[in-house]
Image (cartoon, helix red, strand yellow):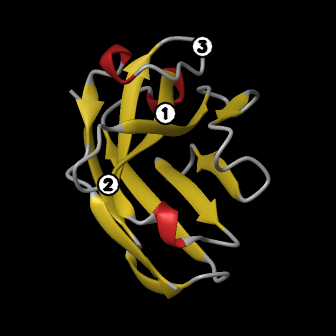
Amino acid sequence: QVQLVESGGGLVQAGGSLRLSCAASGRAWNMYVMGWFRQAPGKEREFVAAITGLGSRTDYADSVKGRFTISRDNGKNTLYLQMNSVKPEDTAVYYCAATLGRIATTVASAYNYWGQGTQVTVSS
């Protein structure tokens, strides 16, 4: 069983930066693909970024490429999302998710474990 707890959300001005963290509990965490998803009010949950178990491969949504960076510290069982040059359209609840596997999947239904989410609000 894997438990995920996000932190680091908050209010930030457009053009600013924010770093989200996701602390994971459970064994063999480096066998899990990890992902970040987000959901804005009135919209469906969408893929943001994913990373393989050893961090060798990453994938990003086109809307965040070049601005966001996903990383993980397996020694600390922690996943990160560095958000730079944020825009008002990045406002959403951000969720981390985990699934056993080798592919940095972008599909939400492929993930078995989810955190409770952290709110990110970008002001213009």
Q: Which amino acid does label 1 sit on?
A: Met
Among numbered discs 3 and 1, the one appearing first in the sequence: 1
Q: Is residue 61 left or right of residue 111?
A: right
Q: Give whichever of 51, 63 is nearer the camera.
A: 63
> Considering the numbered disc 1 on the image, is that residue within a helix, a strand or a loop?
strand
Disc 1 residue crowd, few under 14, some 14–19, many 20+, Cα 10 Å:
many
* Residue at the disc numbered 2: 40
Among numbered discs 2 and 3, the one appearing first in the sequence: 2
Is label 2 or label 3 in front? 2
Residue 64, visible in the rendered structure: yes
The image's mark for residue 23 is: none
- Mark 1–mark 2 contact, CB under 8 Å? no
Identify the residue shown where x is 51% and y is 25%: 33
* Residue at the disc numbered 1: 34
Quadrant the N terminus occupies = top left
Q: Give whichever of 63, 75 is nearer the camera.
A: 63
Q: Quadrant of residue 107?
A: top left
Among numbered discs 1 and 2, the one appearing first in the sequence: 1
**Residue 99: percent from left, percent from top:** 39, 21
* Residue at the disc numbered 3: 103
Identify the residue shown where x is 46% and y is 47%: 77
Q: Quadrant of residue 45?
A: top left
Identify the residue shown where x is 36% and y is 30%: 27
CA distance separating discs 3 and 1: 10 Å
Q: Is residue 2 left or right of residue 29?
A: left
Residue 2, visible in the rendered structure: no
Q: What residue type is labelled 3?
A: Ile
Identify the residue shown where x is 74% and y is 47%: 65
**Residue 51: percent from left, percent from top:** 61, 32
